[in-house]
Amino acid sequence: LYGITRKSFMVISKNNNKSRQVWSNNFSTIYARLVSLALMQRISIMKFSAEVTSISTLAMDNDTRMVERIDDFYMAYIRFVNQSHFLEVTGQQYGIELYDLLLYSMRIKDQVQDLDNEVEELHKFSIVLEKKAQGRSIKLLTLLGSLFLVPSFIAGFYGMNLFPDEFKENIPLLQAVTILILLIAGGLWGILSLSRQENRRFVNFLLAAVLFMVILVMGLSLWAAMRA
């Protein structure tokens, strides 16, 4: 007769040498290893649960570090599931029943299911952080592209044969004014991209005003060129 609780494992047999030898051998070999395996799984689950709690309390000021830690934890948990969490470990009927009783008494199956849900939520959160980081990178690349676009646009505009020779002496001044205005517009656009929602209406107004000044300068340049 075997007795199993969350903290103990015992066997009771008849008081004769043959019976004691048979059950004692099984108890001290295969069954003891089953208990060791179940205890190892329980300890691992407790450790993973503590790690989930630790990751959840991390500061949110470093998304990259958090994503790396979640990924490392996720890979360690996958290895645990594949290498240590077994639903069946022996072909012996008594061993199968005993192992099921061990898992049931330690609530390992329920704990693994709860841990699966927590790990899945962490993994989804890691994906959200990665997409957030990618979005910031795309915004930065877009801003850099816009800044490089400014001198290219100005060089192309004033490089066209739209202005007579008499007007070309004023082109450097117009270039400087246009560059300044466009740089201000680019800076405001960058602020708009990174600003909070409540500040965007004011930044939108400033950006519209700067763009109006750019259009006005370009229009005056073309008007002066046509009059000349």
Image: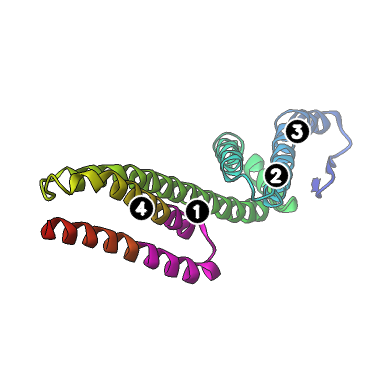
- Name the residue type under label 2: Glu
- Disc 4 vs disc 1: Cβ atoms closer than 8 Å? no
- How far from the left and from the top, in percent, is residue 177? 35, 51
Q: CA distance from mark 4 to mark 1?
A: 34 Å
Q: Amino acid at mark 1?
A: Val
Reading the image, the residue beneath label 3 is 32
Q: In the image, residue 37 lies at what x, y percent?
A: 69, 36
Q: Residues within 10 Å of mark 3 (few under 14, many from 20)?
A: some
Instruction: Give the residue pinned by disc 1.
Output: 128
Of the residues tagged 3 and 4, which is closer to the observer? 4
* First to last magenta residue range: 187-210
Name the residue at 44% across, 51% down. 135
Element carrying mark 3:
helix
Q: Identity of the amino acid at label 3?
A: Ala
Tell me the CA gap for discs 1 and 2: 20 Å
Mark closer to the chain start, 3 or 4: 3
